Image: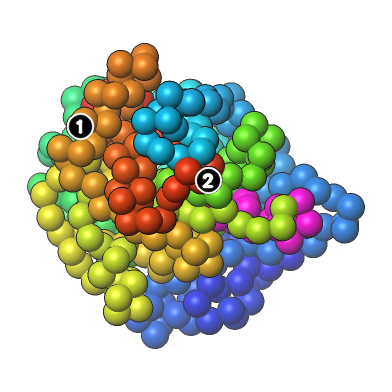
Amino acid sequence: MSNLRCIRCASLWPPGDYPEGCPSCLAAGHPATLECLYTAAPHDLAIPLPVLAPVTLGEGATPTLDAADLARAEGVGQLWIKCESANPTGSHKDRMSAQLVSRARLAGATRVAAASSGNAGVSLAAYCAAAGLQADIAITRNCPPLQRDAMERFGARLRAFEDSLGRWPYVQDLCRNHGAFAGTNYLNPPVGTHPYGVEGYKPIAQEILDDCGLPTDIIVPTARGDLLWGIYLGWQHLHQTGRIDRLPRLHAVEPYARLSRALATGDARGQWESATEQYSIAGGTCTLQALEALARSGGAPVETSDAQAGDARQRLERMGLGAELSSAAALAAVSRLRLAGKLDAESSVVLILTSDGRRG
Ligand SMILES: [Zn+2]
């Protein structure tokens, strides 16, 4: 790796740990993600990652299912389901945890602190156990009991808070004052997770290209946008190295309007809290990296109600596919995008099934 570059002000920073994103933009009140830059030989087409020999539990290389019946029913040309639920702890988060926890260990940290009541917490707890690090996870009181139980079995220390935003000051204190390595955002307004962790999502782009060719559209359940941005970075690499001649559009599924409101004002820092059962993509905030992934790929935000996501989950279950509500929302989004004229019979679409909800 040669440098990190701010996605907002383009300033360059030496390789290292920036859990709060670009220091200049943070000081100006605009938390902004840093992007990893690499020096690679021109013939080197492999997707570069920050940690070359990470702690692993077997994450990645997940299956992509060709869902021809769904494609016909939805009126699109092709439809695939990328089963991130096949990762070791049941969600895409394992790809990020492998890179992030490995970086924490290389940086000499002995503990990782994170705010998560769900998939990220379970995944970080498991990878910390594999790496011999302590995990400190701030959860909310409504954390599903099976998620909580899994974190504890993997040896994590838990602290429960009344509401989601209350967790961030606790994690911030552990990271700023007690030597913990940041496993999630802790700022408000938020920034993307540690860039080395988010890099772990890039191989998803390569795997989709290998399995499906170059799709026109990819639909990604989104909260703070780590997965959306990481997949974008993967396609950006494939584009810059001449493997593809255009980017697929990345669409962000959310339970209520956050990104569309942020896009309207050009400012990601708003607070748009609302109730939803789509637990893994809940919360009132969004991030600049999510806006950038949409803008740079030409994609759009899509809102899906709990009822629409519930219907989509039933359809997936009848095909034998378990999906948490937040993941099934990606299928619900296909109809919405079709109605909005953004998908048609020529579209080739990949849904990211982020988690099977086995502990929901
Ligand atoms: Zn900046």
Can residue 80 be seen?
yes
**Is the magenta region chiefly helix, strand or loop?**
helix
Q: Residue at x 66, y 50 (%)?
A: 50
Mark 2 burial class by Cα count in 10 Å: few <14, some 14-19, many 20+: few
Q: Position of residue 192 (x, y in %)?
A: 43, 59
**Depth-wise, is mark 2 or mark 1 nearer the camera?**
2
The amino acid type, in three-letter code, at marker 2 is Glu
Q: Position of residue 166 (x, y in %)?
A: 17, 55
Is 233 magenta? The answer is yes
User: Residue 310's mark?
Assistant: 1
Q: Residue at x 59, y 80 (%)?
A: 11
Q: Which residue is mark 2?
A: 346
Q: Position of residue 290 (x, y in %)?
A: 42, 61
Considering only vertical position in the picture, is 198 above or below 176?
Answer: above
Residue 89 in the figure: left or right of residue 49: left
> In the image as oriented, which residue stretches furthest toward the bottom?
28
Determine the secondary structure under disc 1.
Answer: helix
Residue 86 in the figure: left or right of residue 224: right
> Marks 2 and 1, Cα distance to the nearest angstrom?
27 Å
Residue 150 in the figure: left or right of residue 5: left
Considering only vertical position in the picture, is 270 above or below 313?
Answer: below
Considering only vertical position in the picture, is 143 above or below 190?
Answer: above
Label 1 CB less than 8 angstroms from ligand 1 = no
The magenta region covers: 230-243
Q: Residue at x 45, y 60 (%)?
A: 299
Is 77 magenta? The answer is no
Mark nearer the N terminus (2 vs 1): 1
Mark 1 burial class by Cα count in 10 Å: few <14, some 14-19, many 20+: many
Q: Residue at x 50, y 77 (%)?
A: 8
Q: Position of residue 314 (x, y in %)?
A: 24, 23
